[in-house]
């Protein structure tokens, strides 16, 4: 029984978790999260420059007069609360890959 479970686990790891589409989805997700975090943290560092104020406005609850930790916490709360589809839509829209829908 134990051998069968180990073989099944190995098969799932090879055919599901290491499947090209799964790996590409994971890599894409990391790239989108990294890009958005970079955009929002940059905006928090220079909130009055260019479009940065608009990034800050997207967050909703943002402690403008708070500490750096409070600001970063607000940004990570906002991004970590995104669904996969909202992350994808937001990334595409902010990077000019799609029009507003």
Image (cartoon, grey):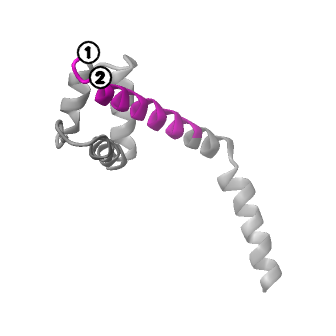
Q: Residue at x 40, y 32 (%)?
A: 36
Q: Residue at x 67, y 41 (%)?
A: 20
Q: Residue 96 appears at what percent x and percent y? A: 37, 16
Q: Nearer the viewer, residue 89 or 4?
A: 89
Q: Would residue 41 be counted in the magenta stretch?
A: yes
Label 1 sits on a secondary structure element that is loop
Q: Would residue 22 be counted in the magenta stretch?
A: no
Residue that carries the numbered disc 1 in the rendered image: 49
Q: Residue 26 appears at what percent x and percent y? A: 57, 43
Residue at far right of view: 3
Q: Nearer the viewer, residue 100 or 59?
A: 59
Residue that carries the numbered disc 2 in the rendered image: 46
Q: Give the side of residue 99 with respect to residue 53, left or right.
A: right
Label 2 sits on a secondary structure element that is loop
Q: Give the side of residue 66 with respect to residue 45, left or right.
A: left
Q: Which residues lie in the magenta part?
A: 27-49
Q: Residue at x 21, y 33 (%)?
A: 58
| Residue 80 visible in the picture | yes
Disc 2 and disc 1 in contact, CB within 8 angstroms: yes
Secondary structure predominantly adopted by residues drawn in magenta: helix
């Amino acid at each position: 029984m134990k051998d069968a479970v180990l073989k099944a686990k190995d098969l799932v790891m090879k055919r599901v978790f290491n499947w090209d589409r799964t790996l590409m989805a994971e890599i894409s997700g990391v790239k989108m999260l990294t890009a958005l975090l970079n955009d929002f943290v940059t905006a928090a560092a220079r909130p009055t420059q260019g479009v940065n104020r608009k990034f800050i406005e997207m967050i909703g609850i943002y402690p403008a007069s708070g500490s750096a930790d409070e600001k970063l916490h607000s940004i990570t709360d906002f991004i970590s609360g995104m669904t996969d589809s909202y992350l994808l839509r937001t990334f595409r829209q902010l990077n000019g890959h799609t029009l507003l829908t």
